[in-house]
Structure formats: C-alpha cells, structure tokens
Amino acid sequence: MTSTLAPTLTSALTPTLTVHRVTPGDAARMRALRLEMLADSPLAFLETLAQAAARPHADYRRRIVQASTGIQLAQFVADPGGRLIGHAGGTVLPEEPAATVVFAVYITPTHRGRGVLASLMEAVAEWSLSVGRRELMLEVVVGNDRAVRAYERLGFEDTGVRVPHPVVPGLWELQMRRRA
C-alpha cells in the first residue's frame, strides 16, 4: 500500500511524496515525527511530549515493528524521502470489530492543505478494507473546527456521539465515521 501524490499537491521541495505503511527502518524518523506531533498539538494525543521524549528508542522501534504487519494495528506515514511529514494509524477495538479506529493523525504544519491528509486517510481505508473492516471511525477534540472540516471534506460525518477526552478532564471529543 504505497501511493504517490502528484507534484502539484506537494511543495517544490518534495516533488514526490509517498505514503506507506511504516517499516522497522522508519523507527528513528517516526520518533522525530511523534515528538513534533506532541509539541505542535498536545491535546490531540494521549501522551505528553515529556513522556514521549523519555521513552527509549527501543520502545519506538517495538511499536513500529508491531504496526508494520498484521491486521490489528497499522501506521502509515507521508514520506518525502527525508523527515516524515505526516502520520495516520488504524486499529480495531474488541467492542467494534467491523470498524477501524483512526488514530494519531498529524500533518506537519507547512504541508497542511496540500492533499497529504487525504492520501494518509486513503491508505488507512485501503488497509481497513483489505482486513475486512468497511468503516472508519475517529474522534476529534470538540472545538478543533479545522480538523472537523478537513475530515468532513474526506467524507466523515459527525455521529452526534460525544465522549470525554481520555486524558484531559472536562474536555470532550466528537466521533466521526465514514465508509472505508
């Protein structure tokens, strides 16, 4: 599952951008992207920058190895051939075996609005279908209107379900779904 964005969707500095499932060789670049994600958007993820920075490289590598194969967990990255610029993961929860839960979606700020999100989401959707799950579900912090609009452009719909943020008391997330 590798896709390439057309040059018009990327900057002149990244004429060819591939989206692919992570490989063990991506561990160091994925760690750098994870730290960027947490510094840029701390409310969107379940760990803090300090927690992630304190984790040894071996932990990142183990997680990447787990996400590189199989049907329970997958992570996809936007790769211009250097520093990774985007990520989206997919997993399955026992209580919803027919849906892939999309998690840890992030695009480096300088590459937002250039089609990277659509390519990452398509990779997750293709994987989801390949393992027999026909629906994608994600949760977005209430008030993150830019993200909600971006997901709506990709076919996600607000289900009306609101759940407490898993880490920050008093914060809520809205659930969105679409067909894979």
Image (tube, grey):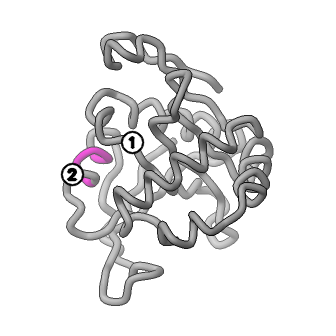
Residue found at x 24% / y 61%: 144
Q: Which mark is residue 18?
A: none
Mark 1 surroundings within 10 Å by alpha-carbon count, few (fewer than 14), some (14 through 19), many (20 or more): many
The stretch of residues the image draws in magenta is 148-152
x, y (%) of residue 79?
A: 53, 28
x, y (%) of residue 168?
A: 39, 83
> In front: mark 1 or mark 2?
1
Q: Is residue 51 left or right of residue 57?
A: left
Mark 2 surroundings within 10 Å by alpha-carbon count, few (fewer than 14), some (14 through 19), many (20 or more): few
Residue found at x 50% / y 51%: 136
49 shown above or below 1: below
Q: Label 1: which residue?
A: 107
Which quadrant, please, contains the N terminus?
top right
What kind of element bears circle 1? strand
From the viewer's side, name the closer residue of 58 and 46: 58
What kind of element bears circle 2? helix
Q: Label 2: which residue?
A: 146
Q: Magenta part mainly helix, strand or loop?
A: helix
Tell me if residue 97 is in the magenta stretch.
Answer: no
The type of residue carrying mark 2 is: Arg
Quarter of the image for residue 55 reads bottom right
The type of residue carrying mark 1 is: Ile
Quarter of the image for residue 13 reads top left
Q: Is residue 64 left or right of residue 5?
A: right
x, y (%) of residue 65?
A: 79, 47
125 shown above or below 41: above
